[in-house]
Amino acid sequence: ATLPYSNLGGLGDFSTMNQTFVMTTPFFIKGGDDKYPPQGIYYKDVGRQRIEDELGMATLIPFDLYVVNLTEYVPNNWFRSGRSASASPNVTGDLGLINLADNQFCAFKYSFVSQADGEPYVINQPFSFFLFDFDTGVDEGLLTEYTEVCGLDPANPYDLSETLYAPFVQSSIEAIELADAADGTKCFRFFATQPGTGENNPEFASDIFMPLAEMTPFTITNVLPNLLRLNFVSGLSGFILEYQITAAQDVGSSGRNFLFTGYALPRK
């Protein structure tokens, strides 16, 4: 995926806001974001869906992703939001990223977008969405990351690393089941239980989607325990994730990054 536009919460600047892209992209032309300039993050080419016609001929349809905050967005470092490679001049990576200040809560809407006409794009099969780097601060109860989500598959709503990589990895994430959504899908709240810093952040999604035997020791030890796979039902054109971070020792002085991606092929 590429990142042609980033202005989450209206906090971007000219270096992250490609106005030419806005003026030529169907989603924005049709008022996909009713604010101007648009106040979200646009990821282009996040996926391709295989569609078969009546004769069994398959076509791969590309689609995009737009992320916007539904409640007040208060980051610690706004310029980090977008993609992990944009977090620092010395950082590489292709993961999606949202930065949030400590002692803050924010709900975000993730919407799939048709490249062809800018309309909501429906995923006609079950799909998974991955979150990484769920951890806490060094001091107990401080800088703890939480997320809450609905729309999950009743048969298998989520997977932790201890399920995906049993018996070699133990997850550091806890899950609490909430009341079902009105449509019968599952809702859960997840939270971190182990401390961590930016040093244990993954860089490339493709480094994780490979056989365990081919992963680096760093990935197995530092990345996998903090991994969460959300399994969504078919027929969705988006979902809402609520993020929360508890206070730092000095309230308002810090923050954390929420890293995410869909499935990616391993790098060659």
Image (spheres, rainbow, N blue to C red):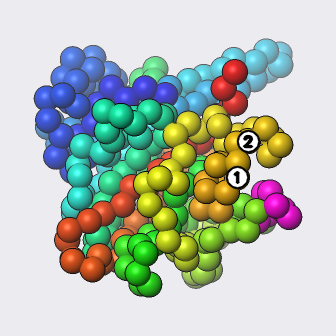
User: What secondary structure is found at the residue carrying circle 1?
Assistant: helix
Residue at x 67%, y 57% (from the top left corner): 221
In this view, which residue lies farthest toward the right?
167
Residue occupied by mark 2: 215
Is residue 116 located in the magenta-colored stretch of the structure?
no
Residue occupied by mark 1: 220
Residue at x 41%, y 40% (from the top left corner): 84
Closer to the camera in the image, 230 or 224: 224
227 relative to 206, above or below: below
Q: Which residues are magenta?
A: 162-168
Residue 189: x and y, percent? 54, 75
Residue at x 24%, y 58% (from the top left corner): 75
User: What secondary structure is found at the residue carrying circle 2?
Assistant: loop
144 relative to 262, above or below: below
Closer to the camera in the image, 158 or 214: 214
Q: Residues within 10 Å of mark 1 (few under 14, many from 20)?
A: some
Split into 4 quadrants, where in the image is the C terminus?
A: top right
Pointer 1 with pointer 2, Cβ within 8 A:
yes
- Residue 265 lies left or right of residue 252; in this view the side is right
Q: Residues within 10 Å of mark 2 (few under 14, many from 20)?
A: few
Quadrant of the image occupied by residue 83: top left
